[in-house]
Image: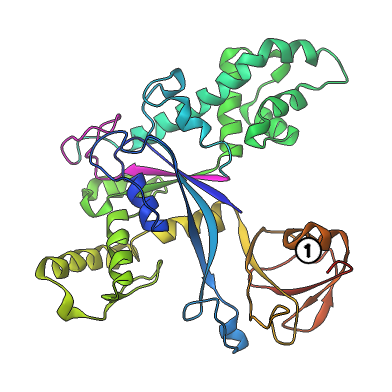
């Protein structure tokens, strides 16, 4: 399953974002290092369920909206020089190893300094947090490579052991391939075999961008000065009110409002049960949603999955006529796959044995066979025919 990590300095709202996205327990506090150990939960990316266009009943979605699970990790807050051991140091960085992408949660209100201490709203430039996070991650990877550098250079003198392979093996925990290493070398404009410390740091910056793609999310946007929002928007930031999303999720669970994560608004179900402060709070959230097209939490996850990672959703079935599995459950599964994936790739995702025994695939919409080299599209409903059961 895809894993996303929430990163950022202390007190920027990561744990609130995590709790809003997963409804999993997470300690939330207005002080640095509220999170000491990483929180692990399941969030979801939102997509349309094919049941609507197929005009068939489905028990796996909510009014035609399907939520596909992804792992979400809320790691401890990062402070400057964490790679040297400050704050919680490498504990933070190690928790990012298995992440496919990172959502960098930034305090868009500018009300916390670089170490997460409360300051006057608007007095801290959130863009500085972006610079230092990227620097910390670069220096973390540089520390790993530099530790093995002398040995790597000796081994690289052998024509049978290219340095690209050696570096990828050193960084194997980050799932970095020799091809990634070559791409980073080219982008950095260096020759690894002759790289000095400065060149190696440039290389590590590029390998960080390749292995840990990142989205910057301006949280606490409901408190952010317009001048900061405008500046962050020009740098491609997404915006969110994690506290607003958490309030809506809790109100929906209590059946006070009708709301699905990612909706651009909500409606009241039991207005009489709401106190005046609750009504006022919901009114403020509604204003933020109107301005930004939602609270931004679900939108940030969807953007990371769809745009940053370029994933599509494919629905495997066993019966292409009923669009169901062998038990009659309609569209029971939904898999996230890379663009360019084939039916054979889908077969292996369903089960290794099914992939090994792959014979052919059927497009359940058209009832036509498709080649094993056919490029799957977002929303495809596919039957896999295999020798394996």
- What's the magenta region? 100-121
Horizontal relation, residue 193 to residue 286: left or right: right
Q: Which residue occupies the foreground of this view, 159 or 145? A: 145
Question: Residue 156 at what x, y percent from top left?
Answer: 79, 16
- At a point 29% along the width and 39% down the height, the residue shown is 11
Locate residue 265, reporting x and y percent: 32, 72
Q: Where, by quadrant of the figure, is residue 380 drawn?
A: bottom right
* Residue with the most extreme bottom position: 55
Image quadrant for the C terminus?
Answer: bottom right
Tell me if residue 101 comes above or below residue 134 in the rendering.
below
Nearest the viewer among 32 and 287 is 32
Of the pair 188 and 311, the residue shown nearer to us: 311
In reply to whether residue 232 is colored magenta, the answer given is: no
* Secondary structure under the numbered disc 1 in the rendered image: helix
Q: Tell me if residue 282 can be seen.
A: yes
Q: Which residue is mark 1?
A: 347
Up the image or down, 53 lies above or below 227; here it is below
Q: Residues within 10 Å of mark 1 (few under 14, many from 20)?
A: many
The residue shown at (40%, 36%) is 76
Residue at 54% across, 61% down: 69
Does residue 79 appear left or right of residue 309 in this picture?
Answer: left
Q: Position of residue 232 (x, y in %)?
A: 34, 46
Percent x, y for residue 329? 64, 80
- Please count the marks in the image: 1
Quarter of the image where the N terminus is located: bottom right
Quadrant assignment, res 52: bottom right
Q: Please say whether residue 201 is visible from this viewpoint.
A: no
| Image quadrant assignment for residue 146 | top right
Display colour scheme: rainbow
């Amino acid at each position: 399953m895809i894993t996303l990590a929430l990163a950022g300095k202390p007190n920027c709202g990561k744990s609130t974002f995590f709790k809003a996205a997963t409804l999993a327990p997470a300690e939330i506090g207005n002080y640095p290092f509220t999170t000491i150990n990483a929180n692990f939960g399941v969030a979801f990316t939102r997509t349309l369920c094919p049941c609507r266009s197929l005009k068939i009943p489905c028990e796996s979605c909510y009014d035609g909206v399907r939520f596909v699970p992804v792992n979400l990790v809320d790691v401890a807050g990062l402070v400057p020089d964490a790679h040297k051991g400050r704050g919680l140091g490498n504990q933070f960085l190690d928790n990012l190893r298995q992440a496919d992408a990172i959502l960098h949660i930034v305090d868009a209100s500018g009300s916390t300094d670089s170490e997460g201490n409360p300051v006057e709203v608007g007095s801290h430039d959130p863009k500085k947090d972006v610079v230092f996070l990227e620097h910390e991650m670069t220096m973390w990877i540089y520390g790993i490579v530099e530790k093995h550098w002398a040995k790597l250079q000796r081994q690289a003198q052998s024509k049978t052991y290219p340095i690209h392979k050696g570096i990828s093996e050193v960084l194997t925990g980050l799932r970095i391939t020799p091809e990634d290493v070559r791409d980073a070398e080219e982008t950095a404009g260096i020759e690894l075999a002759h790289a000095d410390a400065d060149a190696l740091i440039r290389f590590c910056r590029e390998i960080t961008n390749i292995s840990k793609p990142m989205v910057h999310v301006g949280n606490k946007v409901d408190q952010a000065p317009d001048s900061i929002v405008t500046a962050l928007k020009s740098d491609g930031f997404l915006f969110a009110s994690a506290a607003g999303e958490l309030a809506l999720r809790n109100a929906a669970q209590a059946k006070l409002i009708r709301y699905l994560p990612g909706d651009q608004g909500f409606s009241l179900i039991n207005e009489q049960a709401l106190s005046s402060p609750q009504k006022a709070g919901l009114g403020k959230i509604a204003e933020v949603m109107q301005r930004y097209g939602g609270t931004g939490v679900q939108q940030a996850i969807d953007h990371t999955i769809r745009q940053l990672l370029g994933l599509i959703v494919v629905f495997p079935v066993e019966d292409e006529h009923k669009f169901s599995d062998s038990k009659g459950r309609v569209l029971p599964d939904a898999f996230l796959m890379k663009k360019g994936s084939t039916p054979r790739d889908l077969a292996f995702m369903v089960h290794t044995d099914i992939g090994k025994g792959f014979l052919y695939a059927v497009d359940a919409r058209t009832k036509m066979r498709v080649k094993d080299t056919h490029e799957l599209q977002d929303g495809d409903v596919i039957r896999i025919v295999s020798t394996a059961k």
